[in-house]
């Protein structure tokens, strides 16, 4: 990888970190404070939220019919998601220590906090919990797989692909065999360090 591209990648990573920090500070200034794992809203905000909540019957009548009809299909996905979660977590728990790879913390990816929102009724909270689990799980799995790819095969593809993980940008160029074994070992050693 040439120096110009490496410099741009470093700038992108720095900007992502800066944006993450700015968004986090904005969140805490808005309506709530995070105290450990608890989320606390100001009293006035909680009262406003409760007034905005739709009761179940009003929500049911105003909900789009297609959402109700497709509900069983959407929620039927919980079984494959749970099975995938179990298998990926088992793989990571057993293999990552053998490889010397730092484990991915699930709680960094699967965050279930929307049930604290008093303006959502129990059905909406259920929807939000399900979506947070599914989206968080896919991010968690993507991180586990990206660490696995870095360990076994940190080589870019010949064809451009969309949706690559952050590690992919530093992988070895396709067809670049120069010192591949030495580079592979460096990638593996890096996975043993805290991310």
Image (tube, grey):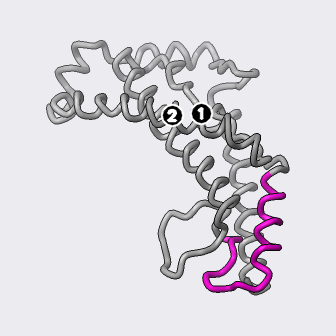
Left or right of 69 in this view: 148: right
Helix, strand or loop at disc 2?
Answer: helix
Crowding near the residue tagged with mark 2, few <14, some 14–19, many ≥20 C-alpha atoms within 10 Å: some
Residues drawn in magenta:
169-191
- Label drawn at residue 85: 2
Helix, strand or loop at disc 1?
Answer: helix
Q: Position of residue 30 (x, y in %)?
A: 64, 33
Q: Position of residue 123 (x, y in %)?
A: 34, 19
- The image quarter containing residue 11 is bottom right
Crowding near the residue tagged with mark 1, few <14, some 14–19, many ≥20 C-alpha atoms within 10 Å: few
| 64 up-or-down from 96: above or below | above
Q: Position of residue 139 (x, y in %)?
A: 55, 45
Left or right of 10 in this view: 93: left
- The image quarter containing residue 58 is top left
- Label drawn at residue 90: 1
Label 2 and label 1: CA atoms lie apart by 8 Å
Q: Give the mark toward the camera: 2 or 1.
A: 1
Q: Earlier in the sequence, mark 2 or mark 1?
A: 2
Q: Is residue 184 shown in magenta?
A: yes
Q: Is residue 64 shown in magenta?
A: no
Query: As rendered, which of 136 and 193 lies closer to the eye?
Result: 193
> Secondary structure of the magenta portion, mostly?
helix
């Amino acid at each position: 990888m040439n120096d110009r591209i490496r410099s741009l990648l470093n700038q992108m990573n720095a900007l992502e970190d800066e944006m993450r920090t700015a968004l986090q500070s904005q969140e805490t200034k808005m309506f709530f404070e995070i105290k450990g794992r608890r989320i606390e809203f100001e009293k006035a905000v909680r009262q406003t939220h409760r007034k905005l909540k739709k009761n179940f019957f009003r929500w049911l009548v105003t909900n789009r019919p297609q959402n109700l009809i497709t509900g069983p299909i959407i929620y039927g996905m919980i079984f494959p998601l749970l099975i995938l979660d179990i298998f990926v977590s088992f793989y990571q728990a057993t293999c990552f220590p053998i490889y010397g790879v730092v484990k991915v913390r699930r709680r960094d990816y699967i965050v279930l906090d929307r049930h604290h929102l008093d303006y959502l009724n129990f059905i909406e909270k259920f929807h939000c919990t399900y979506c947070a689990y599914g989206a968080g799980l896919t991010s968690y799995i993507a991180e586990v797989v990206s660490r696995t790819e870095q360990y076994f095969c940190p080589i870019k593809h010949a064809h451009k692909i969309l949706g690559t993980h952050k590690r992919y940008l530093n992988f070895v160029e396709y067809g670049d065999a120069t010192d591949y074994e030495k580079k592979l070992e460096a990638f593996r050693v890096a996975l043993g360090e805290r991310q």
